[in-house]
Image (cartoon, rainbow, N blue to C red):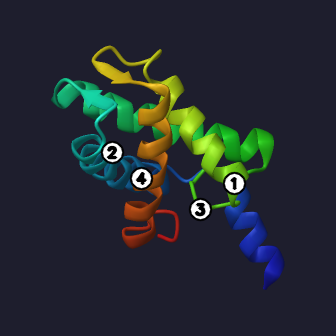
Amino acid sequence: MANLNNARAETFNITHFIIRVVVGTVVLAITSYMTQGLTITGFWPLIIGGFVLAGIDYLATKILGVDATPFGRGITGFILAAAIIYATQYFVSGFVVSFWGAVIGALIYGIIDAVIPAKTM
């Protein structure tokens, strides 16, 4: 049974990725509203930001082997989540975040993501 779960976790599932993008986008919108140093200027930067966050999260999980959610691996996951939120501004026009905005945003994102988990689906 354990091998079946590990094999399923190692493969890319487009449905899971889409669910992660949708839930991540909603969580990102709430986080942006609640965080002073995190600004998203419109609908499309929000959608593209959701895709970028989910993509970088997926790559971090596969390459580094670290769960990039703020509460995924303790302080390591929190720092990685803040770095991903901060790095997203370089990929998405209309997504502006300060250093402290990324730190506070990672904390709020983690709390909301704990209430609305998309990784368990």
Name the residue tied to disc 1: 75
Give the residue at x 68% y 40%.
Answer: 60
Amino acid tagged 4: Tyr
Amino acid tagged 3: Phe
Judge from the rendering whether residue 92 lies leftward or rightward of residue 82; answer left or right: left
Q: Nearer the viewer, residue 51 or 88?
A: 88
In this rendering, the answer to whether 57 lies above or below 113 is above
**Sequence-wise, which precedes: disc 4 or disc 3?**
3
Q: Are marks 2 and 1 in contact (CB under 8 Å)?
A: no
**Sequence-wise, which precedes: disc 2 or disc 4?**
2
Decide if residue 11 is in sight here.
no
Q: Quadrant of residue 101?
A: top left
Judge from the rendering whether residue 76 lies leftward or rightward of residue 121; answer left or right: right
In this rendering, the answer to whether 94 lies above or below 66 is above
Give the residue at x 47% y 58%.
Answer: 110
Kindly report the distance in space between the C-alpha atoms of the residues bearing marks 3 and 2.
16 Å
Amino acid tagged 2: Leu
The residue most toward the right is 3
Amino acid tagged 1: Ile
Numbered label attached to residue 49: none
**Sequence-wise, which precedes: disc 1 or disc 4?**
1
Kindly report the distance in space between the C-alpha atoms of the residues bearing marks 1 and 4.
14 Å
Mark 2 Cα shell of 10 Å, populated few (<14), some (14-19), many (≥20): many
Decide if residue 43 is in sight here.
yes
Counting from the top left corner in percent of width and height, residue 23 is at 34, 55
Kindly report the distance in space between the C-alpha atoms of the residues bearing marks 2 and 4.
7 Å
Counting from the top left corner in percent of width and height, residue 62 is at 73, 44
Give the residue at x 19% y 23%.
Answer: 41
Name the residue tied to disc 4: 109
Kindly report the distance in space between the C-alpha atoms of the residues bearing marks 2 and 1.
20 Å
